[in-house]
Image (cartoon, grey):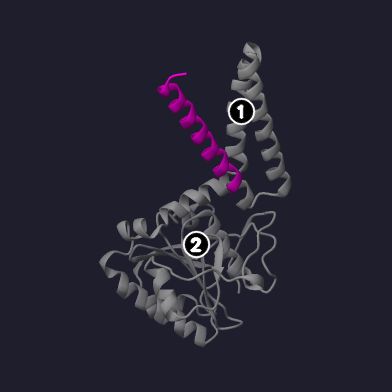
Amino acid sequence: MSWPTKLNDFLEILILTGIFYIILRFLLETRGTGVIRGLTILVSLLFIVSLFLIEVLNLVRLKHVYDNLVSIFVIGLIVIFQPEIRRGITQLGDHRFFGRLFNRLGAKGEDIAEELIAACRAMARRRVGALIALERSASLTPYLHTGNKGTALDSKIDNLLLQTIFHPGSPLHDGAVLIQGDRLIGAGCLLPLSRNENIPKKYGTRHHAAVGLSEVADAVVIVVSEEKGTISVAMNGNLHENIDEAELREFILGRPGVEPASGDDAPNEGPSKGGEAPAHA
């Protein structure tokens, strides 16, 4: 066997090992159920054994069947784990490097952050519930127009305007405010509830809606609790509870450096069930 052939074989083994390692690690960390993970691992092992037998025994007809089944299997994996795949791609786009490169707030980011922080501070002090979603790379426009009761707006982001919208007597307080770049584009919008059934019951509908949106989009979702007077942020399916103003500023500007809440203070992984609802506290 020549050196080029040995090198090619080594590279093939190395690449296949890397691919299977990534797949197995993904399956261990995914939110899919244990049955799906176990079935996927079992089928993967069967495919590996079948490929080995086909190559060793030169089973031509079985190889033809194998090639077709592999394509079906790959498509099935993509369908089953579509939410997790989308979340992984979103997290790649949320890397700090890309966040700085594609900052949606632009040069006005600091001013916008101060307006949002002032509004959240005032509402938390008065125990006024609020839900504010900041668009990043994934558009939030569908949550304004598609079968939604949201009201379209086109306003600059203003502390007093936000407090007025979320005042208990306001017709728009029962829903989320959507922010796109440096503009407030909608209020009273419905957000998808979290599909995680294991989120602690202490969280209200606003927190479920915040986590739910962050599971399907890369938005930063701010929640003000009217029960506790605390500020939380949902991002990438994680809820960062009771954050201070400095941490809130980092989230708004796209450079968070805090870890999600743990234990009873964070959503846990589990089976999923979706829906939409107005965001009550």
Image quarter of the C terminus: bottom right
176 versus 169 height, above or below: above
Q: Tag 1: residue type? A: Ile
For disc 1, the neighbor class at 10 Å (few under 14, some 14 to 19, many from 20) is few
Of residues 64 and 102, the one drawn nearer to the viewer in this rendering: 64
Q: Quick check: 242 above or below 36?
A: below
Label 2 and label 1: CA atoms lie apart by: 41 Å
**Secondary-structure class at tag 2:** loop
Q: Which residue is mark 2?
A: 150
User: Which of the 4 image quarters holds residue 226?
Assistant: bottom right
Residue 12: % across, % down: 49, 30
Residue shown at the point (70%, 71%) measured from the top left: 201
- Position of residue 41 measured from the top left corner of the image (x, y, whole percent): 67, 39
Vertical placement of residue 230 versus 184, above or below:
below
Is 52 located above or below residue 99 in the figure? above
Q: Please identify the residue farthest to the right as the structure is shown.
A: 35
Name the residue type under label 2: Gly
Predominant SS along the magenta part:
helix
Is 153 left, or right, of 20 in this rendering?
Answer: left
Q: Is 8 inside the magenta-drawn segment?
A: yes
Given the current orientation, which residue lies at the most extreme bottom position? 125
Image quadrant where residue 276 sits: bottom right
Q: Is residue 158 visible?
A: no
Q: Is residue 60 visible?
A: yes
Find disc 1 in the rendering and name its residue. Answer: 72
Q: Total marks drawn?
A: 2
Q: Look at 49% across and 26% down and name the residue there.
A: 9
Q: For the magenta stretch, what is the residue range? A: 1-25
Q: Looking at the picture, how far across and down is residue 102, in whole percent?
A: 32, 56
Of 224 and 184, the residue lying toward us: 224
Q: Percent from the top left, x then y, of residue 30?
A: 61, 51
